[in-house]
Image (spheres, helix red, strand yellow):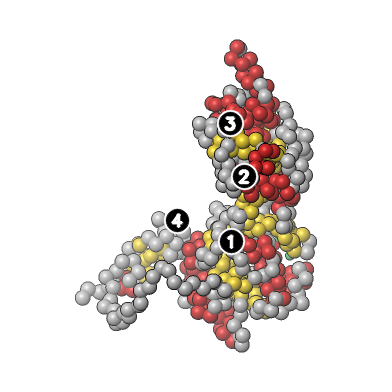
Amino acid sequence: MAKARTQFICQNCGTVHSRWAGKCDACGEWNTIVEEDPTGGIGGGPGRQPKNKGRAVALTTLSGEIEDAPRILSGISELDRVTGGGIVRGSALLVGGDPGIGKSTLLMQAASALARKGHSVIYVSGEEAVAQVRLRAQRLNAADTDVKLAAETNIEDILATLSMERQRPDLVILDSVQTLWTDSAESAPGTVTQVRAAAQSMIRYAKSTGAAIVLVGHVTKDGQIAGPRVLEHMVDAVLYFEGEGGHHYRILRTVKNRFGPTDEIGVFEMTSDGLREVSNPSELFLGERNESAPGAAVFAGMEGTRPVLVEIQALVAPSSLGTPRRAVVGWDSARLSMIIAVLEAHCGVRLGQHDVYLNVAGGYRITEPAADVAVAAALVSSLAGLALPPDCVYFGEVSLSGAIRPVAHAAQRLKEAEKLGFKSAVMPKGSQDVSEASRKTSAEIADLPDLVARIAGGKLLTRERDNDEF
Ligand code: TYD
Ligand code: MG
């Protein structure tokens, strides 16, 4: 039999190289190429004759007994919602976010909340010394809880420590995964190989003991957690902690969850003594509203299962530039261009000579297309110089033909608006599940020209007619 040749495989993208190199040509990562024995089956090698003949497993049916995943609740309801009702025992959770956003703060608060409820929690810090972590715990009023603490980065040492514990821990927090390293991989901590190997060992520990683990990961400039994009598919749930510079609130967002819904958010405010839960984010986002200014529309949005009201601000001003400026904060700029094009093509609203600025108040980010109608309302209101009614909310998706399409959860959006004192709504015709009472107080519109006429009357159309004569 010919001598089996080893292969060199990039640990980041899986490309097979014929020889070792410092940099993978395929994905551009450094230090990710590792020599592997193809007879191990990796990389499509011929494979050895297996010693183990294989054992038959019993096949089963889709229906049958199901046990609910056992969960541990922290009592921090914003966190519990995002995890889908508590952290599942034996699962691995990845919490990503920019450095300094508050990940360690959040997890220290979660750890102490869990410890107060009698769970055994171990916090392993790889970035800060014990004294620093203690100082933070004091500031967060968490110092009196029996969270067990270690400053350690070597996986073998961490696992040995965990196995020495008399009582199996309920939760182990590793802050951060980029500092961890294992003897079994040779590259430096923070490289793909190390991060992946370290995470793999910890995930195996979680599955075998039933302890839940939380891995903290820093996001790099290009928006991925450094190196370990590979981690996202290995863990059971991925949460991102986000916030805008200059704003105090932070949003915890579910990106993946094997045990619950995604698209959930938890909202927190960073204060001098830690993160505070914001149970009604709409109030926060609508806090500093100037109701009589033209160009502001309140959007009744949804984040997962939760309605969130935010103000969308537009400023439309005559441009002195050959190519007018379009600037957006908190929304998709391609989507804004689309709304402007539809307003021009189907509603006779001319924005070609105007600069358009769009801002979502409070530094919040909207991803829903349901914001189209609110954006269009804000644009038209600013252009016409007419303020929108202060007690009205807007939602609906605009199609390229100018039609306004219904969106999901209309009833929930209306209910939240009503709760916050809004009296009416502008929504798509044919919205589902809306009560008769809400229908009476809201306007159901079928297309964008309808919306423009409702806001500006003949004002913008007159202007267009002037242009035509000209
Ligand atoms: P931290 O949790 O260390 O961020 P990460 O682990 O994501 O890198 O949070 C750091 C920031 O939070 C820091 O700039 C200070 C601020 N902070 C407060 O405003 N209040 C507090 O009580 C704490 C502990 C931190
Ligand atoms: Mg930290």
- Farthest residue in the front direction? 436
Picture coordinates of residue 117 (x, y %)?
70, 76
Q: Earlier in the sequence, mark 1 or mark 3?
A: 1
Eyeballing the image, is 309 above or below 466? below
Q: What is the spatial separation of the Cα atoms under label 2 and label 4, in whole angstroms?
A: 52 Å
The residue wearing badge 3 is 448
Q: Nearer the viewer, residue 342 or 60?
A: 60
Residue occupying the point 66% across, 21% down: 458
The residue wearing badge 2 is 434
Q: Nearer the viewer, mark 2 or mark 4?
A: 2
Packing grade of label 4 (10 A; few <14, some 14-19, many >=20) is few
Q: Earlier in the sequence, mark 1 or mark 4?
A: 4
- Farthest residue in the top direction? 469
Q: What is the spatial separation of the Cα atoms under label 3 and label 2, in whole angstroms?
A: 21 Å
Secondary structure of the residue carrying tag 2 is: loop
Residue occupying the point 29% across, 81% down: 53
Residue occupying the point 61% across, 75% down: 171
Q: What is the spatial separation of the Cα atoms under label 1 and label 4, in whole angstroms?
A: 27 Å
Picture coordinates of residue 290 (x, y %)?
77, 39
Q: Earlier in the sequence, mark 2 or mark 4?
A: 4
Q: Nearer the viewer, mark 3 or mark 4?
A: 3
Tell me the kind of residue under disc 1: Leu
Q: What is the spatial separation of the Cα atoms under label 1 and label 3, in whole angstroms?
A: 37 Å
The residue wearing badge 4 is 28
Q: Nearer the viewer, mark 1 or mark 2?
A: 2
Residue 237: quadrant of the picture: bottom right
Picture coordinates of residue 49 (x, y %)?
26, 78
Residue 46 seen by the camera? yes
